[in-house]
Every structure is written in C-alpha cells, then in structure tokens.
Image (spheres, rainbow, N blue to C red):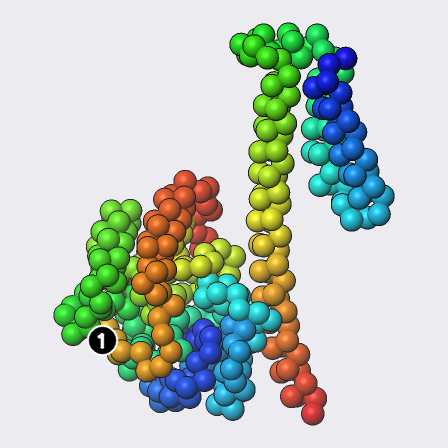
Amino acid sequence: MSKVQLIAIMLNLGLLGVIIELIRRGRLKEKYSLLWLFSIGVMLLLSFWRSLLHIIAEWFGIFYAPSLLFLVAFLFLILISLHFTVAMSGFAEKNKRLAQEIGLLKHELEKVNSIIK
Amino acid sequence: MEKVLIIIPAYNEKESLPDVIASVRKEIPEADVLVINDGSTDTTGFIARREKVEVIDLPYNMGIGAAMQTGYKYSFAEGYDVSVQFDGDGQHPANQIRNILRQLQEGRVDVIIGSRFLEDTGYVPSFSRSIGIVMFARLMSIIMRQKITDPTSGFRAANRAVIEFYSRHYPEDYPEVEALVLLHRAGFTMTEVAVKMEKRMSGRSSITPVRGIYYMVKVTLAVLVDLLKSTERRRCYE
C-alpha cells in the first residue's frame, strides 16, 4: 500500500467519522449528508482498489494515478456546493413566503382585535 | 364600482409618508390605501397607522420586490379589481392616478405604466441614470415588441388578472424591469401613460453610483434568464 493511498484512506475515514457523528448528534440532517457519504464511499473505493484507480486513470490519460483521486474529490466538492446553493435558494423562497404570511396574518389579527375591542 | 387598492411600499419613509397618503386620499378618496412597512427602523409603521390606512409590517427588510408582492397577495385575497403601485417617497404625483386608472379601463390592457419619458415632462435624470434607463428601454422594446420608454418606473396600475399573477410570481430585488418581462412572457398586455414625476421629497434613491453597475448587470442577466424560464400563460378572470 503506497503512502498516498494510506493518507487518502485515513482522511476519508476521518471525514466519515465526523459526518456520522454530526448526524448522530442531529447537527446534520440525513438529507444533506447523503451526497457526502456517497462521495466518501467512492473515494474509499478508489483508494482501496488500486487496479481500478489505475484503469480509470489510464482511460483519462492521467500518468500519475493518485492524482485521479484529487480530480474525483474536486468534482464531488463542486457537486456538493451546487447541491447546497440549490437547497439555499429553496430556503430563501420559503423564508420569503413565511415572512409575507406573517405580515398578512399580523395585519389580519390587528383588524380582528380592533373589532373585538 | 371597481375596488381599487393603492399599494405604498415604504422603508424608512416617516418624513414623506403623511403627505403622500394625504395626496392620494385627496385625489382618489374612494380607493383603499395599503402601506407595506418593509422592516423600517424608524417610526414608519406608527406614522402610517396614525394616518388610518391599512398597514402590513414585514418582519425584516425584505426588499421592494417581496414587499410589493405582499401587497399583491393582500390585494388578491381581499378581492380588489385594480392595484396601483405608488412610491412612499413622494416622487409619484397622486393627481395622475385617476388618469392611469381611466386608461386601464379604456385601454383594454392589463397594466398601465406611468412613464417619465413618453412626453417631455421636464424630468431630467442624472447622466449615469439616463444611460441605464435608455439601455433598458431599448432592451425591453425589443423583447416586448412594443415601444417601452420607462421600464424602471415604479408607478403602475394592474388589473385583477395581473394581481393574481403577481401574487404568485414577482421578482425580488430591483423588480421593475423584470416584472414587465414576466407579464409579457405570460401573455399580458401593457401600455405606457405619460406622467410628470417630482424630485423625491426625502430619502435617497436605493441606487447609489456604486450599485448602478451592479443594478445594470443584475437586471440584464435576470431579464435574459426570465426569457429562458418556463412560465405559465395568463388565465382568464372574466
């Protein structure tokens, strides 16, 4: 097992531990952890299974196979941040609707109160 | 008799609001007035209530787009036939509302835009601002296939079908130009009416020189994106 391989495996296992702990404590929702877990799974697979890494690297024309790991990690990071910005846009929209509803409801309440009094 | 709602979005407009409300009341006494207090940090909400108009307080400063949409949501829920967007800073002349309402009825269009540039009304914007307005006017005229001279004007009147549409779809920041594109895409019709606008009585434009560039880029981009968005066609409310 090469040094690079070992470091990659350690890092991935460490990250996996952090993510599982965050889920366990309820700090990270399962919904938002799936992509993380999937990326870690793929990274671990490529780190352990050396021949697979070499086959794919050759395919892409990458001379130094472990640098494929960086490429894959990079692609997953892009995917994850895209996922987050999409999720954020959804939250922003929902937040807007909630705030508008609150404004309308408070106005309604004010009106009802003034009738009662 | 048509039910008319004048929607006045206000963010820290305590200085100008009483006069604005008074002038609207005087010109269109039969209309209801709704002030959207967009998370003001001054006494705008209190001042508006003292003037005995309807007031909706938003929980935080949501921006003009979300504030206007709140007005349209209210307008739709309360069954208004016509809504007029009217600035709280005193730059829109209340004595033109009647004319705009009449044009909306007679013109058989869905929206009337109060334009500062349709006729020479003596309104001269700053140099940088007029570049922006002219550029957007050109762009919009091409997109809408009709002459638009003042796409950034916030002085507008909309019928019930548009009220319903806007209560569901309204752009967020710097919404004026985009709001027209959305209407056009959904198949609504609009026309401009010349109005003379005042210099604002108090407060400052939301668009500072630094934000000017951002405004131009953001709105142009948003308009182009709007053209790609899938939209629903207008519905009939006859």
- At 46% from the left edge and 78% from the top edge, which residue is drawn? B12
- Side of B217 relative to B8 (left or right): left
Secondary structure of residue under mark 1: loop
Label 1: few (<14), some or many (≥20) within 10 Å?
Answer: some
Q: Residue B205 location in percent, x, y?
A: 35, 71
Looking at the picture, tell me which residue is in the foreground, A9 or B184: A9
Q: Residue A54 location in percent, x, y?
A: 65, 9
- Side of A70 relative to B62 (left or right): right
- List the single residue furthest toward the right: A24
Is B219 situated above or below B22?
above
Is B100 situated above or below B19?
above
Q: Quadrant of the rendered structure where residue A36 is?
A: top right
- List the single residue furthest toward the left: B120
Q: Quadrant of the rendered structure where residue B19 is?
A: bottom left
Is A76 situated above or below B178?
above
Does the rendering let one see residue B21?
no
Q: Quadrant of the rendered structure where residue B196 is?
A: bottom left
Q: In which quarter of the image is the C terminus of chain B?
A: bottom left
Q: Which chain carries label 1?
A: B
Looking at the picture, tell me which residue is in the foreground, A32 or B230: A32
Residue at numbered disc 1? B196
Is A3 situated above or below A26?
above
Looking at the picture, tell me which residue is in the foreground, B62 or A49: A49
- At 47% from the left edge and 75% from the top edge, which residue is drawn? B11
Q: Residue B213 location in percent, x, y?
A: 33, 55
- At 32% from the left edge and 82% from the top edge, which residue is drawn? B201
Q: In which quarter of the image is the N terminus of chain B?
A: bottom left
